[in-house]
Structures are given as C-alpha cells and as structure tokens.
Image (cartoon, helix red, strand yellow):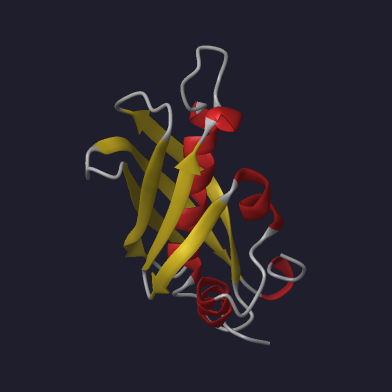
C-alpha cells in the first residue's frame, strides 16, 4: 500500500490517471507537496450557470480537490480521510478564465484538521476562498476509502 502523497505525485507527473471527477470537470493536479496542493482549471462555457458565469459548484469542486489532496498528502500508509465541512466565499464572477486553486493545511491534528484554499485567476486576483474541516480515518474506517 502506498501513501496518498505518492499517489498524488504520480498523478501530478502524469504517471497515474487522474480521478474520474478531474476528467469530468476538467481540472488538473499540477503539484503536490506535504501540506499543499495546486490544481489548475480552465473555465469555459460548459461550466456556466444559467446567468452565464462559472457555476459556484465547480469552484467548490476544485477547492475541495485542492484541499483534500493537501490534507491527504500528510497521511500515513493505510490512512484515509473524509471531509466533514466545506465553506466557500465567492468573491468575483468568472466567465472564461484559467484558475489556480491552492490548498494548504492550516492545522492537522491526530483526528481533525483545518484546510484552506485560495482560488485566483490568471492575473492573481482572488476569485474565491474556501475552508474545510477534515477527519482522518484509520483501520476499518479507512478501508475502501
């Protein structure tokens, strides 16, 4: 069994396939290191809400991915995690843009941790900020997750 950091590094290098949600939405893990993950995403018309702007759920997805990968990068072999809570603030509308979501572990305790994510556009302007509470799973709780 490999550590989640090893699996994420393989995905970022292109040596392993991305998870299905990444292919569906179109985001890419570009780098990962202990406690931090960077996800890039190109917003297109296909991601628009009825008003024509980027759907907020897509921003939640890329933030959740960046935060989850950042959190999991610190887990030991045989451990997994689940998200207990996710909060996001939408700070500006997006139509078509290249976005970068940077997830960072703020505090990772033995069982519960806090993770944050800033999503910026290609000009470095803050589009959204998210936080997440994650719980580490071990033993039987981690099996199959």
Residue 63 position within the rendered picture, expressed as x and y whole percent measured from the top left: 45, 46
Foreground residue among 24 and 97: 97
Quarter of the picture containing the C terminus is: bottom right
Query: Residue at 38% of width from left, 75% of height from top?
Result: 33
Residue 110 position within the rendered picture, expressed as x and y whole percent measured from the top left: 44, 70
Left or right of residue 37, residue 141 in this image: right
Residue 5 position within the rendered picture, expressed as x and y whole percent measured from the top left: 50, 78
Query: Residue at 36% of width from left, 50% of height from top?
Result: 100
Residue 32, quarter of picture: bottom left
Query: Residue at 54% of width from left, 47% of height from top?
Result: 84
Q: Is residue 111 visible?
A: no
Residue 7, placed above or below residue 60: below
Q: Is residue 14 visible?
A: yes
Query: Residue at 38% of width from left, 50% of height from top?
Result: 101
Which residue is the extreme one toward the left? 124
Quarter of the picture containing the N terminus is: bottom right
Left or right of residue 86, residue 82 in this image: right
Residue 39, placed above or below residue 108: above
């Amino acid at each position: 069994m490999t550590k989640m950091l090893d699996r994420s590094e393989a995905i970022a290098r292109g040596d392993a396939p991305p998870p299905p949600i990444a292919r569906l939405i179109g985001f890419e893990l570009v780098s990962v290191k202990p406690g931090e993950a960077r996800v890039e995403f190109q917003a297109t018309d296909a991601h628009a809400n009825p008003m024509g702007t980027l759907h907020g759920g897509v921003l939640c997805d890329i933030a959740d991915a960046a935060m989850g990968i950042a959190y999991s990068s610190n887990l030991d072999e045989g451990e997994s995690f689940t998200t207990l809570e996710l909060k996001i603030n939408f700070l500006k509308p997006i139509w078509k843009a290249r976005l970068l979501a940077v997830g960072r572990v703020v505090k990772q305790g033995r069982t519960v941790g806090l993770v944050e994510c800033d999503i910026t556009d290609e000009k470095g302007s803050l589009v959204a900020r998210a936080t997440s509470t994650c719980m580490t799973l071990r033993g039987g709780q981690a099996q199959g997750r």
